[in-house]
Each structure stands twice: as C-alpha cells, then as structure tokens.
Amino acid sequence: MTLSPRIIALSLAVVLPLPAVWADEPSLRKITAGGGELNLGKSVPGPIDVAPPAFAILEDAEGMVIAAGGKSGKGRAVAFSHGGFLLANEFVAQKSYFTVLQNALKWAASAEAPVTVGLHGSTSNLAPVLEKAGWKAEVISPGDLEKRDDIAVYCVVGQPGRGMVEADLAAIQKFLKSGGGVLVSATPWPFGNQYPEFEKFPGNVILAGSGLQFRANGYANGKRPILINRLTDDSPIRAAEELLSGNTENRANLIKDFRKGPFLRGANQEKFIAILEKLNRKTGPIIPTRKQPVELGKDPLVDAIIEAETLLNLKAEPGKMYAIPASADYPGAVPDDAVRLTKSLTIDAKYKGWATGRNAGAWQAKEMRSTGLYAPPAGVIEVTVPESVVGKGFEVTIGAYGGGLNNRKKWPRYPRLQRSVPIRETETRISNALGGLITIRVPRGADLGDQKITIKGGVAAPYFVLGKTSVEDWKNTIRKNPAPWAEMESDHIIIALTSDHIRDLEDPTAVMELWDKYLETAAEFAQLERGSYRKERLVFDRLPAAGWMHSGYPVAAHSGGDSAVAVNFEKLKAGSWGFFHEYGHNHQHNLWALPGTGETTCNLWSVYLFEKHTDKPRGETHGAMKPLRRKQVRNAYFNKDKANFKEKWNVWAALDTYLLVQEEFGWEPFKKTFAEYNTLPREQWPKGQQEINDQWVIRLSKHCGKNLAPFWRAWNLPLTKKVDEALKDLPTWENHPVAGYGKNQ
C-alpha cells in the first residue's frame, strides 16, 4: 500500500525542538498576553523547528510549533508557519490572534506602544487593519530598509512567488541583525520538492541564526483550536485533580479542561505530569494490546490520558516524563539489571538520498543510522557529536517507527512511539517515555564522511551487520542482548523488529544476503544503481499507520506472521508479493504515473522479482494473477463493448494492461523506458496528467519498436494527437490482445 503525501509526512519521525519553550518566559508572556483561542479553519500551517534560546509561541493540538520567537544578531524575529498569518484575513479577524500579532510586533520592535511598521508588498493588505489599531504602516521594499531609521519592524511572507530576489532576502536579514524586528510568515510544506536543501527556503534564509527554521515535512492539526498563553492557566491541573479524586460530576467539562494540560509550561507542566501518572495508574493502568485495544470514544478519559501522555512525551524536557506503564508491554520492557552503557561509535555522515521523484518511497526522508543501542522508557540519553555535525540537519531518534494511529479507531499500542530532536549542540539530551531503538538521522545531501559520536544511557540491542558481525558472537552473545528490539543490517536494508523474533535465529547471513539480492533486482528493474542510494528500512510494528503494510522509509508491516517470514530464509526464498509490492512502491516514479495506478505499477516489481528469484509460474504468485481471473477482470472491464476507464481501470485491470505489453515485448522496453525517465532533463518533464499519459505511450512504444497507441486507446487511456504524430513512423501493434474488445480504437 502506498501512502498519500500527507500520511507519509505524518508517518515520518515526529521532530520537535528541544523543549526550552519557556527559556524566555518574559517574552512569551508579553506576546501571548490576553490568552484566548485561535481557529485555523481550512488553513494548514507547517512546523517550525525551534532551537534554544528561541521559544515556541503557538502550538497545535499535537504539540507542533506553528509560531515562535527568537533573536538574531541585535534584532528579534517572530515566525508564523502559514503565509496567511500576516495577511488581512480570517486570522486577523479573530481578536485573540490580532492581539498576539500586535504583541509580537511590539516585542520584535522592543517597544511598549505601536510604532512604524514596514510592510513588504506581500503583506500590504495589513496596512489599513494596523492603522485602524493605531499603528503607522507603510509598504516599503527590502532594499530601502537601510535608508529608513523610522521603521522599527518589518513584515514579510517568506515563500516563493512573493516577488523577492536574493538581494531582498539579504537586505531583510541585514535589517534584522542590525537591530530591527522582523515578522515572517510562510507555508513551508508545499515547497519541499523545490528546496531539497530547505535552509535555502526564503523564510529560512531570513531567519538564519535566530534559532527558528521552517520545516517542509509536516502539517498542523487544525481540528481543535490553538490555545494561547498556557503559562499561568491552572485549570488543567484542577481538572486532573478532580478526575483523580473520582469526581464524576460534570465529567465532560473536566476532561475538556484536562486536555489542555500538555500545553502547560514550566512548573505547571511538572505538576500536571505528576498528577497524570497517578491518573493513568488509577484508571488502568492503561495498557493497550492486540487482544484488548483501546477503542476510541469508549472512555473519553482514557482517550484524554493517552493523548496527554503522547504529547508530553514528544515535547517535555528529557527526563521529565515518567515511563508510561504501557511501555512494559510495547515496545517492550528493559530488564532492571540491564547495564546502561556509554558507547563510542563511528557513523557515516554522508547521504546522497533516495532517487528523486519517488513520493511513495519518501525520497526526502533522512536516513536512520543504527547504533546498536536501545533507550529504556523515560531514560535520558546523552549524545555527543563533533562540532562539524551541529546545526546541519542531523537528529537523534528514539523509536524504530514513527507511524501514527490518528486514522485508526482501535489502538493496540500508543498512537506515537517515536521521538526525534535536532542536533543543535555538541551535546544533545533526549528521552522517550516509551523507550525505543536509538538511531541518528542523516539529512539528504550530507557529505561529512565518518564522524565519531558517543552515546550514554542506552542498553545493548541485538544488532547484526552482514559481513562485520561474527556469527559466533551473534549466537553466543549478541542475540541475547537485553533490549526488546533488534536490528539486522546488510548492504541494502536494515530490518527492525522485536527481539523475540531473532532470539532463536542461529545465523542471519543467508536471509540478509537474500534481502540484498531482492533489493538489487528491484533497483535493476528500475534501472537504478542500488549501492548509490540509501539502505532501505523495514520495520515490523503491532499496527502500521495505514493498511496491512505500507511503503516509504521505513516500509512498515505487521509484526507476527510477516516478521517471521522476513527473518526465515526458507519462507523468504519462496517470495513475498507483499514485500515486493511495497518496495515496488518505493521505485515508482511520479513522471510515468498514469491515472489511478498507485496500487498498480508497484505490482510490476512483484511479478518481476518472483520471475527472477523463484520458479513459481506467474499465475501462482497471487490469486489475481491466475489466467482465468485475469480474463474475468478483462471481460468485466470491457463489458458491453465499453471500456470504463475512469471507474474500472483500477488495480488489477490496469496491471493486466501493463502485463499484456510485457508478455508481448518482454521486460527490456520497460527498463529502457524507466532509465530514460531517470535522467530526463527538467525541461522535458511532463506538465500535467495529459502529458504524463502521452509521454509514457510515446517512450514505451519507441522502446518496443511498435506504435502502442491503439492498444492503450482500447483501454480508453486519454491520449492526444501528439502521440500519433510522434509515433507515425513506427509500425502499429495491430493484433494486440484486446483488439477484439469493443470499438474504442
């Protein structure tokens, strides 16, 4: 199963700033004075990474920072993660937000009263609104800022399409560092592809050095209002105390106030956490399992406790959260006598990334480097790195899998298991109340080579590296390591799963070599050099974020039967349609994606890998591949001589289309076509779905040596006359397999 771009983003690591959100409490109090709520409506802000001493101002219901403040040079900056925050629109129309905006202007300008505000052309419609509130506002170009001593603060939408060039960005940054105030808004998530190095995103160029950076991956949760000023509100604490005492009167309102608890800060947050732990144990303790999952809505208090613990686990300072009781069941308990280690190791801090244009493969994801260590639940992990790694996009992660369960109605585990923090200093501290494998995330494009790091506080995990780990050491010692999760690594893949699946595995060599062969073949079909890119990851979880399995980085599958196959050579060598399917997704290219084929073309990899690595006939690899079943699907598609492309050209009908071409012309034309797309200059990329359709048929036809347009038109794939013109010199594939179906040619 492939994931939508939104789910992919949500299923990646949850990256939150080191929680020094109250590091500048007086500034935060000033900006959020007045309190209230902000409704996002249909707007979807993205995340802001915040490095101390910068501070969060506004957070969504899941703890994602959507507004933050910081200092750069002599100046002050405030960032808002949606372009609309600095426009005269539905945000400014909300009194509570307009108060925050005005307070932010005063704070950035180091003023107690309204001053003169400079407006970039992108924010010009703010002028009448600000003037009505007593401010002086004037539209001014960035290049004129240095000529105007009266401009105290400048507002700009820092994203592409707003008429700014590099000189403008430099002028705004100079104004900021020289002591001016800057408010910058931007919606980051649409621009990840345009800016692979996201520090070059316009808003991030302006904010460089402030401790604030927009992040491309992630979406704010706008289903619930944004709460403003949680420093002094103690209503969540009072509600928690009432619920702990067993008060059932007005329970719904108590739970409503209780759910605000994760947004408390400072001492109030600590008080709330202490009561929360007692409330969990009194209510349960709450331990979701496969046999007894938490059913959302069955008990609103249980839902609220899990939500609060999950949010605080992602945002509280390291060591502030207790070990969540459910952690002993899943991800798993760490023995009390397990030695907490200090381990020095070398990581490869060079990462080219995955091949571009493969959205289902999460091609922008950071690569996770294994450490062989596991963080005990709530245990503080200290990571020391060289100065060369600091501030370069590296992260420390606890937890093998970041897939959330927001779209599931039953939870057999906590909804988020993974926590990541950016490496902003040579020493980074992190904890996870659920525990998890410790990895270092390396950003795409990093080129630092080998880097020595030290990790303190983890326990040893079973960790096998093909070609490096002695089989004797594995059998006698390593597989017995106390961590409840294990990893097995080869040249092309890292498999993470619960340790019970490997305790009896005598020698992982054969199964990991087989995985390498499968992935090499998958890349060969896509005409990619496997060794030039990332090692894939495969994680087995109690419940993946979507489907039975899903693609991406990592590919996720259910623990249990699937994980047993993955580490069993005899079972794995028989082939696995599901595993092949997901890694097919990771190789799909957006440039040749015909309508509705997201769950179709990935299956070409399933067919190809079965053919290359097993002796199973095609018709026995999957129920839908049986010749009779394929014929039935084809007949149903062409029912009454009318090919219903929009409604019926789906998974198996579409796959039949591709396979009929393959069965006539072989695999080589596909591989040559894929290779052509891999190196296609940007100016030749298809623009829109119609050009994608046309180019696919043209390019595949040329590599087949036949005009395939009549065949594709028989299925009613929309094609233009450009296809006929491009293929006019090729002989036509006359007697194609569906020539007798209908009259659509």
Image (cartoon, rainbow, N blue to C red):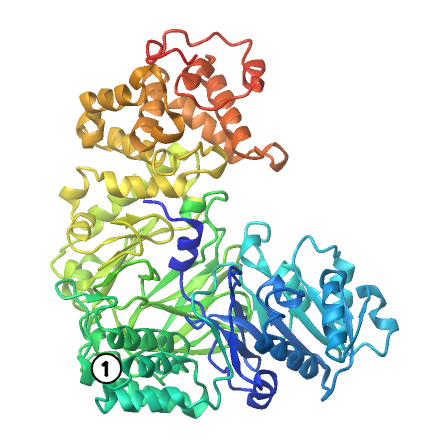
- The amino acid beneath tag 1 is Asn
**Residue identifier under label 1:** 280
Q: Which residue is drawn at 28% across and 59% down?
A: 408
Quarter of the image for the N terminus: give it.
top left
- What is the x, y in percent for residue 223? 43, 65
Residue 208, placed above or below residue 201: below
Q: In this view, does 130 lie to the left or right of 64?
A: right
Check the image and name the residue furthest to the right: 147
Q: Residue at x 21, y 89 (%)?
A: 246
Q: Is residue 87 visible?
A: yes
Q: How many labels does the image show?
A: 1
- What is the x, y in percent for residue 115? 78, 81
Q: State which quadrant residue 740 falls in.
A: top left
Between residue 220 and residue 706, name the one nearer to us: 220
Check the image and name the residue furthest to the front: 250
- What is the x, y in percent for residue 65? 50, 72
Q: Is residue 181 left or right of residue 643?
A: right
- What is the x, y in percent for residue 566? 21, 49
Q: Residue at x 19, y 25 (%)?
A: 626
